[in-house]
């Protein structure tokens, strides 16, 4: 093994710290159940962030595509299993390198901030005033909001805070989601009326449950004129939890969801996606409809708060072309302009900002030898040459540079991330890996057989996600045929 930087896992304490939790009962960290007393059947807190022993690894600070998740406590249903004192949390956030001045902060999203609006809004005040946070503060909720709490949130905005309330509402039956639909609709109406931006989150949309034309039309009638943006999405499936949880609640998921049971994945069938886009028209609801929350948040910052921001995940990158031609059917021209400006930043300027941000999240100098080069196949993308950073590490770099960031790992880094992906996501031993070779700026992994029964499509998806690089998988049993095809596609720019 050559000397090299140590590649971090997404649960490394530098990225997702847990050391300051006050654990009420260590055994409670092994409890499996929803993240709060609202107890939605689909709650991903019941299965996310667990080690092999089932111990919960959730952090009080964590990067994700929406921003920085900031949590004061962990719950399983009504039981609080861990808490961090607010003063300690603020001090941790002050030194947290993944929080940039432009990064959105998401308050208490492991449960529901509306279960204690006073605590959640107080924390937002402190982050804004003590850390000079300039971006949006996001509250994701299903809970009602009293007039006194609405006044508190208005006070936060009056002091310069930028509150954004995401109300999860998709006309779920009460057996699946106990929170009251009428009260959530009222919350959206109140917030919108006083000028606090509100996003309706139509998640999850599930076949046979809330995907009918009648239900979607009900949603349109409920939110029209009461929201600033709408997002939608599918069901997050865990192979050891989701089907059983829905069956226990008296609802058997459609068989199509079973084929996604290799690993955790969100699924929204294409016909349902088309139906949502056809029925929930922006002209009817008076707001844009997005399938990515980061697009909606950037829109709110640019248009509602006059604080121009590009999408922090640079989602317009799509091969040698971009997705801007489809953005025009969805988003405002002001917001598209911000994303185009970020896309067009000179590579050398973006690379300099990327390098500066990389050094901030790397206090030990693990990555000091790494640099950034333009991708020759992906317009608007910079590659970390010889890098094998995990996706959480790339998020602040994307935000600072305005570019999509991927790795261009060396062989050792690529094989490390591939083995990690097969083991962690798919439960497949790394002994199936035979070889790897590089074609221009992309990697090809050679494995024994069709690992996921779909010509390695799903395996490729998770290897790409975990390695954060452009890569492909071929079966050694069809080596010559697939090798020639993949090389041709890469060099012709068709992948």
Image: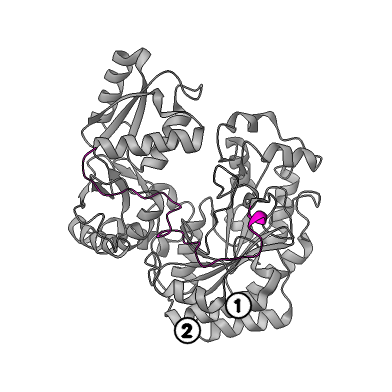
Q: Tag 2: Cα neighbours inside 10 Å, few (<14), some, or many (≥20)?
A: some
Magenta highlight range: 1-29
Measuring 41% from the left and 49% from the top, which residue is drawn there? 9
Magenta-span inclusion, residue 22? yes
- Mark 1 and 2 residues: CB-CB less than 8 Å, in contact? no
Q: Taking 459 as reference, is 4 above or below it?
A: below
Measuring 53% from the left and 50% from the top, which residue is drawn there? 291
Residue 446 percent across, percent down from the top left: 33, 23
Residue wearing tag 2: 129
Measuring 40% from the left and 23% from the top, which residue is drawn there? 432
**3D distance between C-alphas at marks 1 and 2:** 12 Å
Does dot 1 land on a helix, a strand or a loop?
A: helix
Residue 78 percent across, percent down from the top left: 74, 62
345 or 476: nearer the eye? 476
Task: Give the number of the disc on residue 121.
Answer: 1
Residue 230 percent across, percent down from the top left: 59, 58
**344 left or right of 104 in image:** left
**196 left or right of 219 in image:** left
Q: Tag 1: Cα neighbours inside 10 Å, few (<14), some, or many (≥20)?
A: many
Q: How is the image coloured?
A: one colour
């Amino acid at each position: 093994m050559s000397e090299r930087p140590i590649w971090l896992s997404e649960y490394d304490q530098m990225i997702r710290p847990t050391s300051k939790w006050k654990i009420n009962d260590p055994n409670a960290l092994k409890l499996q159940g929803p993240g709060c007393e609202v107890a939605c059947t689909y709650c991903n807190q019941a299965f996310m962030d667990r080690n092999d022993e089932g111990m919960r690894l959730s952090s009080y600070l964590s990067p994700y595509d929406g921003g920085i998740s900031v949590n004061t406590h962990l719950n399983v249903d009504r039981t609080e299993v861990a808490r961090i004192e607010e003063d300690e949390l603020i001090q941790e956030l002050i030194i947290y390198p993944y929080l940039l001045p432009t990064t959105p902060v998401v308050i208490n999203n492991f449960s529901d901030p509306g279960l204690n609006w006073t605590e959640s809004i107080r924390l937002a005040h402190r982050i804004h005033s003590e850390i000079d946070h300039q971006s949006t503060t996001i509250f994701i909720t299903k809970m009602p909001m009293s007039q006194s709490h609405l006044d508190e949130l208005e006070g936060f905005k009056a002091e310069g805070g930028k509150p954004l309330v995401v109300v999860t509402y998709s006309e779920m039956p009460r057996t699946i989601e106990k929170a009251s639909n009428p009260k959530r609709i009222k919350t959206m109406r109140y917030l919108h009326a006083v000028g606090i931006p509100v996003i309706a989150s139509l998640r999850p949309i599930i076949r046979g449950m809330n995907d009918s034309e009648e239900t979607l039309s009900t949603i349109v009638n409920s939110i029209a004129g009461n929201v600033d943006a709408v997002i939608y999405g599918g069901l997050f499936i865990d192979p050891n939890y989701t089907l059983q949880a829905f069956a226990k609640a008296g609802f058997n998921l459609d068989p199509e969801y079973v084929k996604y049971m290799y690993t955790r994945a969100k699924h929204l069938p294409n016909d349902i996606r088309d139906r949502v886009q056809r029925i929930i028209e922006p002209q009817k609801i008076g707001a844009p409809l997005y399938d990515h929350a980061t697009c909606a948040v950037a829109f709110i910052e640019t248009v509602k708060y006059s604080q121009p921001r590009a999408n922090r995940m640079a989602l317009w990158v799509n091969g040698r072309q971009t997705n801007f031609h489809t953005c025009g059917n969805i988003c405002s021209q002001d917001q598209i302009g911000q994303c185009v400006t970020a896309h067009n930043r000179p590579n050398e300027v973006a690379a300099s900002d990327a390098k500066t941000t990389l050094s901030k999240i790397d206090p030990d100098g693990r990555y000091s030898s790494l640099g950034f080069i333009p991708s020759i196949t992906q317009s608007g993308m910079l590659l970390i040459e010889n890098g094998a950073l995990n996706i959480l590490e790339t998020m602040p770099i994307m935000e600072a540079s305005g570019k999509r960031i991927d790795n261009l790992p060396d062989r050792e880094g690529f094989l490390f991330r591939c083995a990690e992906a097969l083991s962690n996501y798919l439960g497949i031993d790394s002994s199936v890996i035979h070889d790897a070779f590089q074609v221009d700026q992309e990697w090809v992994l050679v494995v024994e057989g069709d690992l996921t029964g779909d010509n390695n499509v799903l395996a490729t998806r998770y290897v790409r996600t975990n390695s954060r690089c452009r890569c492909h998988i071929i079966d050694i049993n069809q080596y010559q045929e697939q090798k020639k095809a993949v090389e041709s596609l890469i060099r012709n720019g068709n992948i």
